[in-house]
Every structure is written in C-alpha cells, then in structure tokens.
C-alpha cells in the first residue's frame, strides 16, 4: 500500500507552503541594545513584538531559522477558543470555579485573533464554521454531556451535543459514538496568517533577525546579554517564545515542555461530491481519542487536510503518512484510492500540567506550551506578555501563574515519549471496545 498512496507530484513539506513558505530575510545589523529581545519568531514572538510596539517599546525578534520555520506555518489552522480543563492525562479535572478563569481567557484568545485578523485585514481565509468533536467511545460522549454547560457559561462556546443518529449532519462518517459541536471556532490558512503578522512587523520596522540563533543568555545586572553567532545585544527584558523548539539555551524551560511531533497529510483534489460530503458544514473535526486525529477541508474546499499523532516522537513524515492514511480511511472509507500530495510534521509542546503558560521565571518572560492547540492561544499569550512588559495590563491573565511544573526525572530528553504512545494506543483500544 505505502507507495501507492503518494501522488506523483508528492512533496514532503507543508501544503500551506504552496501559498507562503518561510524564507530567510535580508540580514540586518544587530542593534547593540534593545529594550526587549524576543527569542523565537512564531505567532507568540511576533504577537509579543506587536504589543511592545503598540506601547512604544523597542524590541528585536531573533529566530534560529527562517521566521515561520516552527509550528506557526505547519499547523492544522484550526482555531479554538477553549482549553482542556477537564479529563487530562496527568492532571485532575478542574472544579468549575477553578476552570472558569482559564476558560474565560481562552475565550479572550479567540476574540483577540478574530479582531486582529479583521482589523489588520489579514487575508488568511478566516472561516468561522465551528468544530465537531467526535466521541471515540460511549464514556467520552457522556463526559461531553457533562462539560457543555461550563463551556457555554465560561467560554461562550455555543456548544451542543450531537447524538450518534444525527452525526451525519456534521461529518460524512459513522465512525464516532456521537459528539459535540462548538460553534465558536474557526479555521484559517495558518501560513497566510503568519505572513500577515510578519508583514505588520515589517511595516512597523520592527527588527527581525532570521538565521540568528540565541546561543547564550547571561544576566548582567538588571539586564541581559543575548549572545548570537552574529554578535551580542544588551536587552532589558527577554521573552522566550520557542514552544516545541525550546532548546539548551533555556534548560529551565526545556525541562518544562515536552516536544512531540504532530503529523499532517493533504489529499489531492477530490471530486466535488466527495469533497462536499466530508464536512457538510465545513467544520473542523477532531476526536477524543488519545492518539488524536484532527482534520478539515482546505480553504478552497477541494482537499482534506488530515493530521494526528501518527507516531509519538519525531519521525520522517513520509514514514508516518501511511499511518495517517489508515486513520483517514477508518473515518472516511470513501477516500480509498485517493492520493496524498503533501506530508509534513512539526513540534507541539506539551506541559506537565497540560496547560499553556506565560509568566516570568529566572527573570525571563515566556509564553510556552500549546499542548497541540496554540494558533489562538500563543498569539494571545505572546500579546499578553508584551503588554505585561509594557505595564499595560489591568488584570493578570489566568495563564500567568507562578507554578510551571517540572519533574525530577525529566530534563528535556524525550526517550519515554514512544512508550506513552504505546500506552495510549492500548488505553484507546480498551475505551473503544469496553468503555
Ligand atoms: C503539525 C501541527 C499541527 C497543529 N495544529 C494546530 C491546530 O490546528 N490548531 C492550533 O491551535 N494549534 C495547532 N498546532 C500548534 C500551533 O501551531 C503552535 O501552538 C503555535 O504555532 C506555536 O507558535 P509559537 O510562536 O509559540 O512557536 P513556533 O511557531 O513553533 O516558533 C518557535 C520558533 O522558535 C525558534 N527558536 C527555537 N530556539 C531558538 C533559539 N535558541 N534562538 C532563536 N530562535 C529559536 C524556532 O526556530 C521557531 O521558529 C499545531 C502544531 C503542529 C506542529
């Protein structure tokens, strides 16, 4: 099967890069000093820079690669205004009063990205079509029923339950045991959103240095010396916005985020009838399986973009494409024989409490930990970080907390991740067949 699934024009790179691919920018002279140095030029880093610039503070953005090289041009483009406060793998479900502020700020993250795209007229195919979350097993469906009230009260989600017999209204498949619709959700072209942010940065003349890794951060009095192969910068504050690409330069954060590969395939253009049937309301779709899948139509409605945790750990996307293809056929047997034109991967960053975080630690500001869902959230937390440095916040964001947990047995080495994958697959099997 494997070789037959690839289209003759197959590319092992993101489908999104057909519209906008990250490119190295013309080298700039690094300033000797900047009020703020931002490490990482994804959504979080650019959003922090915009907030600082709004407040009249100068900053420089540094990226080890081409800006946009990270997850910000590789993701599924599904935009949600929620955060997982319920059943998690390592943390207990939160009580409603504990969850409410997080859900409130997650809803604000959605408001932020929607307003930004509209205000700046970023042409990124913003489509507010909601999402459908398929229940992998009966117990997950029952959990959804319990969760909906809090989602609607605190995150303004517009959520409602969809019993199995009405599932075909949402998805051209009988695969799930019912599910839930969240109306307050959207999808975008992630690389065009990134390009739009980058254009604003460049229009405002905010300096951005590509192919300039930060190799050392040294406290010097109240300031920082930021070392790169192209020179040093003295900065009053530093923002770490490296998410799933966090490396040895910040071991204190490397110990707190677990980078996990997420994988996506794009199909060739489908026949109009099949394309129209897969997601009849053009919703984004995800499921409650531990070995999660997420999918949606391309902005032109002609292809399926299908992602998931095909493997835990970082692997060649060409090797994982057949696994994703199998997952896709489980849900949509009607796609048998359809070819794949693109397959790619990128890193998401899990945190040990499965929550996103921003704050200040060891005197470094950070916005980290998307847990797989960071288009809205990390745009928002980056922005909030910039505002906080500029002294422009009038309330503390719920995700700005002192406790950013680490674990005595985790130092950034992810040897155990494939074992978690095996455990998840077993638990999924048990839930599906017994749950
Ligand atoms: C395959 C995939 C699918 C996803 N799907 C979705 C989705 O559908 N919806 C959703 O909400 N989220 C999704 N996500 C998550 C989302 O893409 C991320 O949360 C978000 O893009 C993170 O943005 P960021 O700016 O924090 O980090 P990134 O965009 O990852 O940028 C980090 C940057 O830091 C740079 N860097 C690292 N170390 C250094 C250093 N020492 N010096 C300088 N620069 C450095 C890297 O080069 C990189 O460019 C997905 C992620 C992946 C990988």
Image (tube, rainbow, N blue to C red):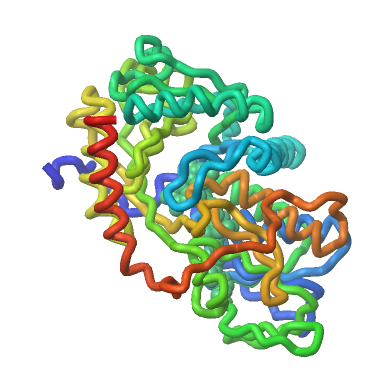
Q: Is residue 385 above or below residue 105?
A: below
Q: Residue at x 84, y 55 (%)?
A: 54
Q: Is residue 226 above or below residue 413?
A: below
Q: Quadrant of the C terminus?
A: top left
Q: Is residue 408 above or below residue 132?
A: below
Q: Residue furthest left?
A: 1
Q: Residue at x 28, y 59 (%)?
A: 418
Compared across the picture, whether 283 is left or right of 290 comes to: right
Q: Residue at x 57, y 36 (%)?
A: 80
Q: Is residue 22 visible?
A: no
Q: Nearer the viewer, residue 433 or 385?
A: 433
Looking at the rendered structure, the number of numbered marks drawn on it comes to 0
| Residue 195 screen position, x and y as percent | 60, 50
Q: Nearer the viewer, residue 245 or 134?
A: 134
Compared across the picture, whether 46 is left or right of 432 comes to: right
User: In which quadrant of the rendered view does residue 322 lie?
Assistant: top left
Compared across the picture, whether 21 is left or right of 431 comes to: right
Q: Is residue 11 above or below residue 367?
A: above
Q: Quadrant of the N terminus?
A: top left
Q: Is residue 185 visible?
A: yes
Q: Residue furthest top?
A: 165
Compared across the picture, whether 311 is left or right of 49 comes to: left
| Residue 14 screen position, x and y as percent | 40, 50
| Residue 20 screen position, x and y as percent | 52, 50
Q: Nearer the viewer, residue 265 or 323?
A: 323
| Residue 164 screen position, x and y as percent | 36, 15
Q: Residue at x 24, y 27 (%)?
A: 335
């Amino acid at each position: 099967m494997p070789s037959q699934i690839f289209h003759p024009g197959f590319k092992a790179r993101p489908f999104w890069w057909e519209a906008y691919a990250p490119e190295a920018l013309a080298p700039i002279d690094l300033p000797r000093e900047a009020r703020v140095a931002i490490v990482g030029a994804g959504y979080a880093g650019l959003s922090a820079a915009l907030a600082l610039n709004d407040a009249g503070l100068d900053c420089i953005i540094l990226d080890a690669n081409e800006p946009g090289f990270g997850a910000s041009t590789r993701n599924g483009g599904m935009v949600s205004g929620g955060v997982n406060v319920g059943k998690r793998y390592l943390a207990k479900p939160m009580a409603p009063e504990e969850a409410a502020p997080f859900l409130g700020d997650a809803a604000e993250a959605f408001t932020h990205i929607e307003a930004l795209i509209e205000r700046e007229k970023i042409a990124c195919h913003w489509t507010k079509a909601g999402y459908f979350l398929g229940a992998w097993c009966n117990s997950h469906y029952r959990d959804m029923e319990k969760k909906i009230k809090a989602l609607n009260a605190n995150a303004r989600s517009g959520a409602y339950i969809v019993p199995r017999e009405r599932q075909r209204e949402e998805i051209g498949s009988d695969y799930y045991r019912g599910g839930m619709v969240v109306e307050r959700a959207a999808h975008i072209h992630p690389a065009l959103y990134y390009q739009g942010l980058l254009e604003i940065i460049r229009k405002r003349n905010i300096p951005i240095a590509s192919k300039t890794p930060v190799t050392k951060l040294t406290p010097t009095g109240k300031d920082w010396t930021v070392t790169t192969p192209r020179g040093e910068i003295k900065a009053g504050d530093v923002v770490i916005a490296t998410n799933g690409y966090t490396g040895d330069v910040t071991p204190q954060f490397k110990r707190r985020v677990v980078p996990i590969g997420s994988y996506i395939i794009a199909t060739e253009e489908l026949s109009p009838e099949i394309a129209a049937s897969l997601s009849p309301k053009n919703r984004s779709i995800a499921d409650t399986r531990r070995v999660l899948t997420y999918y949606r139509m391309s902005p032109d409605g002609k292809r399926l973009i299908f992602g998931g945790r095909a493997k835990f750990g970082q692997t060649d996307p060409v090797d994982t494409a057949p696994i994703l293809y199998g997952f896709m056929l489980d849900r949509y047997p009607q796609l048998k024989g359809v070819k794949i034109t693109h397959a790619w991967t990128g890193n998401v960053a899990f945190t040990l409490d499965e929550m996103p975080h921003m704050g200040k630690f060891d005197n470094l500001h950070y916005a980290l930990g998307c847990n797989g869902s960071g288009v809205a959230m990390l745009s928002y937390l980056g922005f909030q970080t910039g505002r906080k440095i500029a002294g422009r916040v009038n309330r503390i964001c719920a995700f700005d907390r002192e406790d950013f947990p680490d674990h005595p047995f985790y130092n950034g080495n992810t040897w155990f991740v494939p074992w978690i994958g095996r455990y998840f697959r077993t638990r999924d099997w048990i839930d599906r067949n017994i749950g």
